[in-house]
Image (spheres, helix red, strand yellow):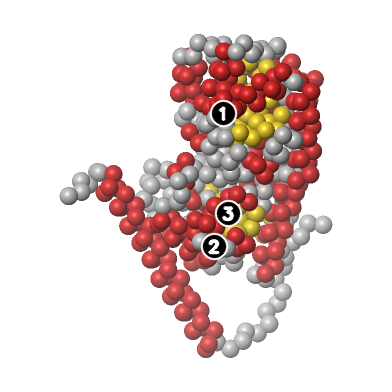
Amino acid sequence: MLCVGSPDFQKGLRIAYRLLTFWSVTRVMKTLASAENLVTAVTPAPRMRPAIESRALRILHVVTRLGMGGTEYGILKVIGGLPAESFEHRFCTTRGFDDALVRDLHLEGKVFVAGELANKFEFLVLPLMRIMKAYKPDIVHSRNWGAIEAIPAARLAGVPVAIHSEHGYEVEMLEGLPWRRRILRRALYAMADTVFTVSNELRTYHAQQVRLPENKIRIIPNGVDTARFFPCPNERRTSRQTWGIPADSFVVGTVGRLVPIKDHRTLLRAAEILAGRGVNIHVVIAGAGPELQRLQQYVASSTFLAGRASFPGASEDVPGLLNSLDAFVLPSLCEGMSNTLLEAMSSGLAVVATEVGGNPEVVQDAKSGWLFAPGDASALAARLESLAQNPGLRQTFGTTARQRVLLDFSLERMIRNYRDLYLELATQRGIPFQVAS
């Protein structure tokens, strides 16, 4: 007998909810398809309508929650890079937004909310559909699992173009997707005009999980603003003073959300090993998140890390922070394509990253940095010790890393890829739009 509050009962509820979602969407889509075929069969060809005046394409970006994560940051870069006369943008969230962020970015009145953060069992297709009917977007672009219900909502609302993209991993994805998510993803991917990921590895993962040919999923890599993130050796001492970082230490650091999948503890363990060997190392872990207190407690309990670690929190001056480092470390258990890794490479830093996800597509091992197995603090310590002892190698890696980013991962290239995709699909659907000269 199942208790109402038991984990098995809750799991059963989640499965039933997703199955009901899948059944409902499938029935509705079949009904709509039948009706469309019937109308086509009995309705004569329409008369030629007068040409519609071209205008900016309306794009509705649907995300789980609007905060300062990598995915949301990427959207803001795209919006800022696309010409306003050709593209109009709005956000829609399925689980609310960060009030301070919306205020700071002057997005008041440009964010729709379809669901509540606390309600994990909320059926979002209908509220999303109502938002779409009110705003009348030309393109709906949903990102990641938490926003995937925007695809059937777009179809039911009559939106001409529906795009879905996958941008990274969560811890629960590492062992594979639950079967109910695989079924839903397969069905909803088929409803979209196109699906893309940010790396080859992420495309392979999702193609295998939902049993789709890889060529059915496109790739648009992330990009970095190389004019904002660039090497500035003259700022090194000033930046260290600003952040309270010792001037004479070998400083390694990382930037990002402080969550379990980022595995910052492995970086601290590696630093602990080096400090025990007498290396004058200092660690900087910048960002905010639920792991902050546990990481600080680890440092406080370590004999070797006392006074050797800084937690500056989330900062808008990431370029200055990166210029204070000697090397950048990305110890994640898995990654889609890390924006902070690209930013570090663009800043001319030697990087050491785990050999997971999209990292090997960015870091050329032993050329622009090093790769190591996730969780292997000893291997990371060995790589960092080599960099600490060899400034010339750090310089070589950093120069090659920036060249790599300039060639393949520039912000301009990413924006051009998004622009081409939006215009391609709008053209296919016969949507009139104004192209910037």
* Quarter of the figure that contains the C terminus: bottom right
Residue 357 against residue 387 in the figure, above or below: below
Residue 40 quadrant:
bottom right
| Disc 2: which residue | 212
Q: 10 Å neighbourhood of mark 3: few (<14), some, or many (≥20)?
A: some
The amino acid beneath tag 2 is Leu
Q: Earlier in the sequence, mark 2 or mark 1?
A: 2
Q: Is residue 360 left or right of residue 22?
A: right
Q: Residue at coordinates 79% horizontally, 44% vertically from top-left?
A: 407
Query: Residue 391, relative to residue 198: is it above or below?
Result: above
Query: Residue 329 versus residue 290: which sits nearer the camera?
Result: 329
**What residue is drawn where x is 42% and y is 68%?**
26
Q: Position of residue 308 (x, y in %)?
A: 58, 14
Q: Amino acid at mark 3?
A: Thr
Which of the labelled discs sits on residue 204, or is there none?
3
Query: Label 1: few (<14), some or many (≥20) within 10 Å?
Result: some
| Residue 379 location, quadrant | top right
Give the residue number, with chain letter if any, for mark 1.
287
